[in-house]
Structures are given as structure tokens and as C-alpha cells.
Amino acid sequence: MPTDLHALLSALNYALAGGDFEYILEHAADDIRWEIVGVMVIEGKDALAQAFEVFAQSETRGMELRSIFASHDEGVVHGTMRVATASGEERSYAFCDVYRFELADASTPLLQHLTSYIVMPQTGALTELLGEGTPPDEG
């Protein structure tokens, strides 16, 4: 029976939040491409493993997956995360990850391409444009 893509998307996000980078590498194609929009592009499994060494310096303090959408070979995950940086500073952000999988066979989808949109709150950034408003719930 084919892998449940919805469950895989959830598992990949929890693996990232929990620092289980081996799980992600097991499910990644050799020529994976991960674009964190406006920040960096990581190409190839070896480069991904190196990036995870840097990511390991932060600690996830909480994550909420708000929605997961999956189709044949693509999926989207939307949520929020709280992390403590290497310096101990806690930061919250919202994210939207767009996944595309290579279907090597019916039971083993490999992560081929990931695009991550990350939004970190910035005081004043949109307030100037949109005016004061009610801030969204943190949870």
C-alpha cells in the first residue's frame, strides 16, 4: 500500500522540530533542493546534512501544525514554531512548507524539493503600511 503522504509530511515536520535529522535524510532524494525563501538554497543530500549540523544549535520549544494538505506527489504544511537560538534567545515564527516528492516506487516517496516560507514578527514592518491592529494569537 502506498505511503500516506499526509502522515509523512507530519512526521517530517516533527522530525525537524525534534532534531531527528537522520529521519529526514532517509526520506530525501540524493539531489534534494531546499529553498528557504530569501535566506538560502541547499542543494544535495550532503549539503542538507551539513545544514542540519548548524540547525542542531537551536532547540525547538514548541510547534503547532495548523494544516496539512497532500496530493499525489506534493504537500503543504502550515504552522508555527518557537525555538531557542544558540545564544538562548527564544523566537517565534510562522511557516509554510511546500513539498514535492519523487515517487521512486509506490511505497517510497523521496523528498525532491522543499520550499519554506518563514515569517518572523517584526515590530513596525507592516504597521507602517497597514496601521495598528489586533495582533494574531500566538498559539
Image (cartoon, rainbow, N blue to C red):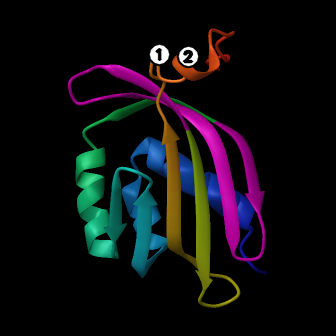
Outermost residue on the front side: it is 129
Q: Would residue 90 be found to the left or right of residue 72 on screen?
A: left
Mark 1 Cα within 10 Å, few/some/many (few <14, many 20+)?
Answer: few
133 is within the stretch colored magenta:
no
Q: Secondary structure at mark 2?
A: helix
Q: Which residue is mark 2?
A: 127
Residue 127 drawn at (x, y percent): 55, 16
> Given the image, on which type of amino acid does mark 1 rest?
Gly
Extent of the magenta region: 65-94
What is the quadrant of residue 106 in the picture? bottom right
Q: CA distance from mark 2 to mark 1?
A: 5 Å
The vertical placement of 93 against 134, above or below, is below
Q: Which residue is mark 1?
A: 124
Task: Residue at 55%, 56% (x, y): give it.
Answer: 12
Q: Are marks 2 and 1 in contact (CB under 8 Å)?
A: yes
Quarter of the figure that contains the C terminus: top right
What is the quadrant of residue 41 in the picture? bottom left
Outermost residue on the bottom side: it is 105
Residue 125 drawn at (x, y percent): 47, 23
Task: Residue at 55%, 50% (x, y): give it.
Answer: 13
Quarter of the figure that contains the N terminus: bottom right
Q: Nearer the viewer, residue 82 or 36?
A: 36
> Given the image, on which type of amino acid does mark 2 rest?
Thr
Residue 50 drawn at (x, y percent): 23, 61
The vertical placement of 27 against 17, above or below, is below
Q: Residue 112 — which label?
A: none
Q: Secondary structure at mark 1?
A: loop
Overall secondary structure of the magenta section: strand
Q: Nearer the viewer, residue 15 or 65?
A: 65
Q: Would residue 99 be found to the left or right of residue 26 on screen?
A: right
